[in-house]
Image: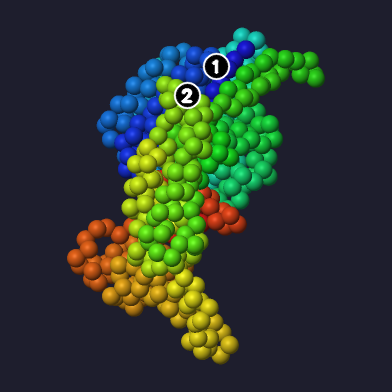
Amino acid sequence: MLTLTHIADTHLGHRQYGLKQREDDMVSTTRAAFQEMIEERGTDAILLPGDLFHSRDLRPKILHQIEQELERIPDEVPVLVSRGNHDENLTPRDVTWLNYLHQRGHIVFLQANLNADPETAWLNPHDPDEPGQSAGFYDIDVADVDGPIRVFGLQWRGAKTDQALQQVAKGIKETNEMHGEPAWTVLLAHFGMEDEVPTLGGTVTHGELRDVKDVVDYLALGHIHKRYESGEWIYNPGSPEAHNTREGRAEWEHGYYSVTLNAGESEAGGDAVGCDVAHHPTKRRPYYRIEFDVTAHESPGDLETAFQEHVRDEQAAMTEYCSQDAFTAQGEPRDPIIDLRFTGTLQFSRGDFRTDELAEWVEDACDALYVQVNTGIRTANVQQLLSEIDEDEVFKDGQLNTAALENRVFETIAKESIYDDHAADVADVLGNAHQMAQAGEAVEDIRDSVSSARQELFPELTDDVVLDIEEDPFADADTGEEASDDTTDGDEADREAEAGEVVEQ
């Protein structure tokens, strides 16, 4: 009867880790998925609920590439797109690149008018002759049933999603009364479900979807970069590419859905539409994790020798993993991104632990595209400090003086770094940054504070300061893994794991 395909979070334009190759990966993976949808699935329409782009501020080359890919799609296959948080970013604009692509006829940009009526969304039909800047719904006519397949779109609303869903549910009812009942209804939306991402603020519960479920047959979601499904009507395909090391793990499925609609008969004797939903993995770049425990090694030289031997022992398994069909291009394994993790207790000065040199060696030895270092180690001196610290120093009237304890720990850490000569001053800076973070001050303000202090203490060091500040909301505190966001500059999200092992979009 009809086949729809559902993909999300393509993040075109994402130059992960600052690498042009990763930017190209986003395009080539999306291109391959589109081609497969058309040639192998016979899709009649493509659904894309948010984050077509990685940023609203596109370079001309990226926009040109996107237009080229959309032009490859046959005219009779509409690409129905709603807006994600990355498409809009922080400050809304009157016109976005989604509006531009809609007006050019490359996509149908679907969004709800939520401002005209606080109770009900206004949802206007798509008019191909006068498309305007967007539409509220798109009808796909089918011959086998009474009524069209009707696709609505809800843009990213963040913390206001619950209210927007109630408006849209009422708006769909009123739209159907005005334009006739559809045979089957799809809603494109960009948010996370609470059961799938319990640590993410602003998620939606099943209870909040009760009214939507009454008027929608297929909720096509984006935003969370892993596949999940719920209740045989909620579907999230997972981003085509992984955008940080957690998303690159084997248990995170990435791909798209094909939705085959079938005409049948309802219990009351009228027309009914059923669907068969299948998930298809996308071909993407592999991530491979190498872990190394530093505890047993007394010197930098001993550690380096043991580390290189450990990596060589991993290479056969890595080659086998990267040879899976999902990770190949033209039949050859793609160069992997390596998630290099150091654990345990370091027995020598942190300043002598040259992770950059070890990562460079791994990149050459393993033919890796990039090596992302995550350092979750402790140092023996800090461990000793915590065990030997004078109780009188950190306890006052039986109460723990956390500020004093933090200062001692920060000072000890600073002494084991390139900042040894100014350990006390650096400890003060770290303590101040910690207090600002606890107070919920903006990341930009904390970064500026640290940068200013660093410039005063070390004027000869002119590089920008990069703070390892948690940004990704998918924190997994139990396992200590970094998580994904839909926010997702992979390099930033991965560095956050290095800072605390608890971490887009």
Find residue 420 and report its horizontal and vertical position in percent: 31, 73
- State the quadrant of the N terminus: top right
Q: Position of residue 75 (x, y in %)?
A: 43, 14
| Residue at point 37%, 18% (across, down) | 71
Q: Is residue 178 visible?
A: no
In the shown orientation, is residue 397 left or right of residue 312?
Answer: right
Q: Looking at the image, how many numbered discs can be counted on the residues? A: 2
The image position of residue 42, as x and y in percent, is 53, 14
Q: Is residue 261 above or below residue 403?
A: above
| Residue drawn at x 37%, y 49% as measured from the top left | 359
**Label 2 Cα neighbours within 10 Å, binned few <14 / some 14-19 / many ≥20:** many
Indicate the quadrant where residue 212 lies. top right
Nearest the viewer among 320 and 340 is 320
Q: Which mark is residue 41?
A: 1
Mark 1 or mark 2, earlier in chain: 2
Local secondary structure at mark 1? loop
The 10 Å Cα crowd at callout 1, few under 14, some 14 to 19, many 20 or more, is some
Figure coloring: rainbow
Q: What residue did someone put label 2 on?
A: 33
* Nearer to the camera, 186 or 12: 12
Q: Position of residue 200 (x, y in %)?
A: 55, 51
Per the model, the C-alpha gap separating discs 1 and 2 is 10 Å
Instruction: Using the rendered view, name the quadrant where residue 268 is placed.
Output: top right
